[in-house]
Image (tube, helix red, strand yellow):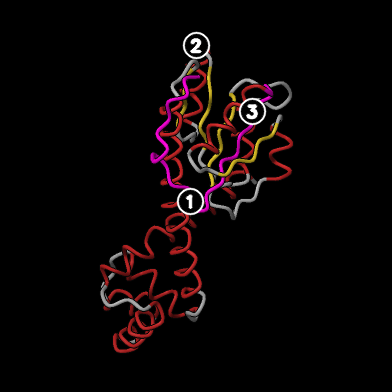
Amino acid sequence: MNKTANKTAVKGDGALIYLVDDDDAVRDALGILFESVGLDCAAYPSAMEFLDHYDRSRHSCLVADIRMPGMSGLELQQRLNEHRAPVPVIFITGHGDVPMAVNAMKAGASDFVQKPFRDQDLIDRIHKALQLDKERRAANEQETAVRDRLALLTPRETDVMQRVVRGHANKVIAMDLGVSQRTVELHRARVMQKLKLRSVAALVSTVGGILAADAAMASGTATAE
């Protein structure tokens, strides 16, 4: 590794770099590198030890060797995916591991760096991974807030809201639900008030993705059963 990292390249913002590598020398060298650019680091010699200490609530990214005894880097990534862990993963790979790293990227890894690498290259990738983590966390917080507001809707308001999101007109919704158009209008107004939205376009963009994700998850669960 070539220690030429720019000390101003990354700002930690309270971030934690998880490092998983079975090579003591690599852990020591990368730990010194991260400290030199102001990044907090928690290093572990095995994937299992990392999993025992991983805090999903912490703004972080994971740097891991793709080949390790016991649980490999790819198996670790699969475990994180199964638990919907939000941490972006950067794999360290050898020359012959590039196809494996490409498969890891397809499975959701954030990036990979091939040995031997320049320290700055790794730091740059960590910077991108931390930004990705920050954006994901902001999106998750927004989704949580929307879901909290959706929970305030009555069953009838939910029925109306779902049909509005699908693009149904008030007249069609009234016929489907066996109520008057005026009743539909009142329900729509309450929905917009509770969700703190001002337009149908905002409703569709805010709620549409959540409804689609819930439907896909329900479909996948039914298929598995």
Labels 3 and 1: the sequence-earlier one = 3
Which residue is painted at 49% across and 57% down in the image? 214
Amino acid marked by disc 1: Ala
**219 or 81, which is in the foreground?**
81
- CA gap, disc 1 to disc 2? 38 Å
- Residue at the spot x=32%, y=69% of the render? 203
Residue 39, above or below 138: above
Number of numbered discs on residues: 3
In the rendering, which numbered label is found on residue 28? 3
Location of residue 183 in the rendering, given as x and y in whole percent from the top left corner? 34, 88
Report the residue at 43% width, 60% height from top: 210
- Distance, label 3 to label 1, CA atoms, is 44 Å
Q: Position of residue 97 (x, y in %)?
A: 53, 15
Span shown in magenta: 1-24
Q: Is 22 one of the magenta-colored residues?
A: yes
Dot 1 surroundings within 10 Å: few (below 14), some, or many (20 or more)? few
- The answer to whether 219 is drawn above or below residue 183 in the figure is above
Task: Tell me the kind of residue under disc 3.
Answer: Asp
For the residues carrying marks 3 and 1, which lies nearer the camera in this image?
3
Q: Is residue 108 above or below residue 193?
A: above
Pointers 1 and 2 in contact (C-beta within 8 Å):
no
Frontmost residue, 173 versus 44: 44
Q: Which residue is mark 1?
A: 216
Q: Residues within 10 Å of mark 2 (few under 14, many from 20)?
A: few
Which kind of residue does numbered mark 2 sit on? His
Identify the residue position indicated by label 2 in the image: 95
Which badge, 2 or 3, comes first in the chain's sequence?
3
- Along the line of sight, which residue is nearer the eye, 145 or 66? 66
What's the residue at 44%, 69% (across, down)? Answer: 146
Q: Give percent across and percent down for residue 2.
A: 47, 20
Q: Nearer the viewer, mark 2 or mark 3?
A: 3
Query: Foreground mark, 1 or 2?
Result: 2
